Amino acid sequence: MQNWILLERKNSIPIMMSAATVSVLLVAFLATFTFALPCSSELRCKCYHVSNMLTADCSNLHLTKSPTFTENVRRIDLSYNSLFEIPMNMPSEIVYLNIGLNNIKYPQKSTLARYRHLRWLYINNNCLWEGYKIWPSRFFEKLTKLEVLIMNDNCPSIDATQMSYPKEGFYGLSSLKHVRMNGLGQGNFGDAFEKNNSIEVLILSQDGGNCVIPNIRNDTLSVFRKATNITLHDCDIRYIHTGAFAKLSELVHLDITENKDLTLSVLTNITYDLRYSKIKKIVADKIQCYNGLSLILKIEHIINLQNSTLKELSLTGNRIALLENMLTMYLPKSLKYLNIGDNVLIFGWYVFMGYFLSNLERLDVAHSEDYKQDFNLECNYYSNSCDQKEEIQHPILKNAIQNQTYRLPPKLKHINIANQRINLETDFGHGVQFYSKNSLTHLYASGNLFYNIPEFSGLQHLQYADLSNNFCSNFTKQVFRDMNVLSFLNLSRNYLGGILKNQASFDLFKFLPQLKTLDLSINTITHMPEKLFIFTNSIETLHLSNNEIESISFDLSSAMQLRELDLSFNKIVMLDSDSMRKLDAPREIPLVINMANNSFMCNCGSLEFLRWMKSSKNKRFLNLKNYECSFENGTKGDLNKLSQIITFLEKDCWSYAAVIAIACVLFILTVLVVCLGICYRYRWKLRYLYYAGRRTIFTGYNMLEYHFDVFVSYAESERQMFIPNLLKLEGHLNLRFCIHSRNFMPGVAIHENITNAIHYSKHTVCFVSKAFLKSEYCMYELQMAKMEGISRGTEDNLLIVLVDGDIQDLHRVVNTNRVYLEYNKDHPEEFWNAFEHALKEMSS
């Protein structure tokens, strides 16, 4: 109270607080105040309210002595301690007491009598049955308000085979509704319980207790006439006599599971007793040995239930291979759930007989993952013949068998055939055809052998399909042709990576417009068709974990309802720009992406991807704090610190980028300079090749025919020095000279004229002078003459006449040790005689 006043005084300080803040503080204070309520002298006990009753939870505190409790405590839990006796110091008005799992072997009747208001008493697992081999009479007689009594024990030293219940041991429990206890070999419940008892639930089980009742006689359970639920689980029952349940007209639930020596034949007695009862559920799982010959479930086993109100029947783990022909006709019309899983069912006519189960809603024939057949030689080998030779006479069934059409129960919604190792290629090679008038909405078919899924027809109401773990590597769009309302499809743990690589497989889900959840995890997928999801516009959840995906090859822009994308446990190092674009489609609801356990890299190449992860506005990455990336030095980075990683990489990559840019510029400049040098070095050859190429293109390739004997190259300023004499020699020697002022083609570029003239002339004469060396065209003519000689494979086509200048100029220009003529200005006659002689030699 002082604390509350202090809080009020503190709140009087003028500090502005929001209403929400005040509410949170008030709730926190009240919660603290509630758990701080004193209810016990042991401070470790938890105190709280359950159904307005103060509860003291002192369980599992290793107590050897009970603490004291306040008088207002109504519920006490002292389980999992080391108490040796029922505490005497508890409030007398407690209604709930749990002292299970202690060491209370000899509870005192007088102590228990103090707590007359008890409604729930848990005194189990205290080795009571070992301590009291013969229980005191009327031990609980003062507990007239007790409704639930849990007192089963599993002490290893207890041998319940020869034990019996104490006479009038449970007298006085007039309000008792629920009792769980050990099943003693004598089974004399009539001696221990009053005839007018109110027990509705009786549980005798080896699970957490000890139960050995070899025979259930017709008077063993007759004292429990108001019982609605009886469980006899793993009680080593070997036989149940006719009449054992005949007087239990109120019985609704019966469980005789794990009594392996009973055999299926006991069903005849049980169902006979219950034919007029209110029975709703029978569980007779594992009442047959796992080993031995396979069995037929006979009509005689269940015919007595034909007119009963039974809704659930479970017969799992009983070595059933076949159902007798027409058996489904004799099952009660009220049956809604039938479980015959964990058997050894084989293909038989019964698969066409579901038509008679007019109200069946759920059928389970699956093998549980922990089911294993054993070969215990000491077990009962009961079997019956599996040879059925009867001919099917019913017209509907005959028609269904002839057309290979499976008539499901008309109201069946759920069917479970998981882990049956059904091979669709051998068992249903031509597809699976169901009668169209069915109501099936859920199909559980994982753990079979659907290597190549055939076409399913007639399942127009199917909403849920689990086809996982089927070794499936191929299917077509026709498989789902009739499943246009399917919303959940599980294809995980198969081998669909091969077919999904093919872009032609984009229409596999064409007939599933309402598909909301698709699971393709664990399928060795590397790529998928880009337009794979173009027909599934309603998809909300897509699982692609545990594959080998490196990038997003599929387009999700049409999947506007997509909310969750699981890409965990793949091989994604980073996403390229195209992949990021495909995930960036605008959505009303943010897309949750799970990319955990991928091999992300933190380097300059992935910087854009990391920025994309940070700046995402219409998507959220699930458990980003668990993502890691690897730096180039081998260290790991936590993507929960994405901003810091991006900042670090931006600085590191900027300097790296600058170095790369400078290096690239220098490289380009170097290549450019080298190229320019090469072009300059071979400029004349390149120009020659250019014009020679043009000539070949426009004139075609022909054998060379010379149009001229000599091409004359000279400086235009020295025309009068050479042309007159050349014209005389031309006539005298009967030669044809090519003189540019006379023979060049008008309208053709000068450089092309020069190249063509030299090409079509046998020889070239260059009158090299200072004026010649200064003329661009003269130098071009000289270089082209050299290139032509190289092209012809000889240098004899070129004659050089040195008009003036020195020998160094000639070598610099011609760059050869070629023999030349020297023009003698003082005695020109001598030059022309020598020139004439040279022409004759060249022409010969």
Image (cartoon, rainbow, N blue to C red):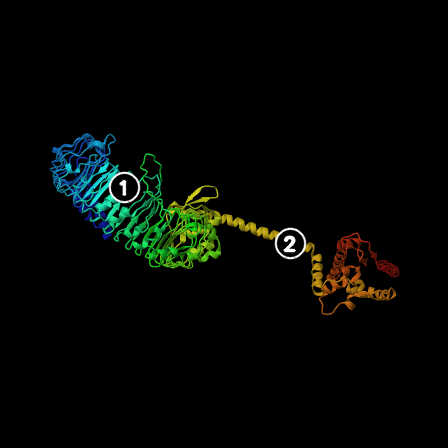
Q: Where is residue 704 in the image (x, y as percent from the top left)?
A: 77, 62
Residue wearing tag 1:
257
Instruction: State yes or no: discs 2 and 1 in contact (Cβ < 8 Å).
Output: no
Q: Where is residue 110 in the image (x, y as percent from the top left)?
A: 11, 33
Q: From the viewer's perspective, is residue 66 above or below residue 608?
A: above
Q: Quadrant of residue 230?
A: top left
* Mark positioned earlier in the residue sequence (2 or 1): 1
Q: Where is residue 650 in the image (x, y as percent from the top left)?
A: 46, 49
Q: Give how far apart the Cα atoms at labels 2 and 1 are.
A: 92 Å
Give the side of residue 536 with respect to residue 141, left or right: right
| Residue 709 visible in rendering | yes
| Residue 18 visible in rendering | no
Given the image, on which type of amino acid does mark 1 rest?
A: Thr
Give the quadrant of the N terminus: top left
Residue 89 or 814: which is nearer the viewer? 89
Q: From the viewer's perspective, is residue 111 above or below residue 54?
A: above
Dot 1, how many residues are within 10 Å of its Cα: few (below 14), some (14-19), or many (20+)? many
Q: Quadrant of residue 726?
A: bottom right
Give the quadrant of the C terminus: bottom right
In the structure shown, which secondary structural element does the residue marked by tag 2 occupy?
A: helix
In the structure shown, which secondary structural element does the residue marked by tag 1 occupy?
A: loop
Q: From the viewer's perspective, is residue 130 above or below residue 793?
A: above
Q: Where is residue 12 in the image (x, y as percent from the top left)?
A: 19, 49
Given the image, on which type of amino acid does mark 2 rest?
A: Cys
Query: Which circle, 2 or 1, is nearer the viewer?
Result: 1
Dot 2, how many residues are within 10 Å of its Cα: few (below 14), some (14-19), or many (20+)? few
Q: Which residue is drawn at 31% across and 37% down?
A: 380
Give the side of residue 113 with respect to residue 554, left or right: left
Q: Residue furthest bottom?
A: 746
Residue wearing tag 2:
675
